[in-house]
Amino acid sequence: MVPFIKYSLIRLALFLPLFVVFALLQTGLLLAAIYAGLIAFAISFLFFKKQRDDATASMRERFSGRAKPIRSALEIEDADIEDRLVDENPEVKVENDRRPKDRRPKEA
């Protein structure tokens, strides 16, 4: 994910000064954004191939289904607490793989 962020920041660093220049040339904000976007795209496409390929590879890995899930500190702490609970109390069952039964209220 880091290569994607790095490449995005490069593109943003190209876009912002170009946008400001076109805005100062009074092209209008919409045209300034379009011109800056096209030029930033062209420059990044021509000169930042390695970063683009790294970003693409990291995104492909993230969405391939083989990547480790991203877990927050709270989720990791919660999992550790559950593990300790199960280790200390073998009679407790954690069945988080089961789907909950249909809990919709019954219509009258």
Image: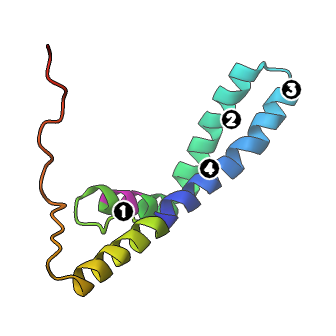
Q: Earlier in the sequence, mark 4 or mark 2?
A: 4
Residue beneath label 3, please? 25
Dot 4 or dot 1: first in sequence order is 4
Q: Are marks 2 and 3 in contact (CB under 8 Å)?
A: no
Say whether residue 53 is left or right of residue 31: left
Q: Give the residue displayed 29% in from the left and 55% down from the top.
A: 63
Q: Is residue 89 magenta?
A: no
Task: Determine whether label 1 and label 2 are within 8 Å by CB.
Answer: no
**Between 1 and 69, the one nearer to me in the picture:** 69
Q: Earlier in the sequence, mark 3 or mark 4?
A: 4
Residue plotted at (18% across, 74% down)? 92
Q: Is residue 49 above or below residue 24?
A: below
Q: Which mark is residue 106?
A: none
User: Which residue carries the number 4 mark?
Assistant: 11
As helix, strand or loop, the secondary structure at mark 2 comes to helix
Region of the chain picked out in magenta, as a range: 56-60
The Cα–Cα distance between marks 4 and 2, rounded to whole angstroms, is 10 Å
Real-space CA distance between mark 3 and mark 4, rounded to the nearest whole angstrom: 21 Å
Instruction: Give the Cα separation between the discs numbered 4 and 1.
Output: 17 Å
User: Do the residues under discs 1 and 3 have CB atoms within 8 angstroms?
Assistant: no
Type of amino acid under label 3: Leu
The residue nearer to you, when weighing 48 against 30, is 30
Residue type at mark 1 is Ala
- Residue to which mark 1 is pinned: 57
- The residue nearer to you, when weighing 73 against 56, is 73
**Label 1 vs label 3, nearer the camera:** 1
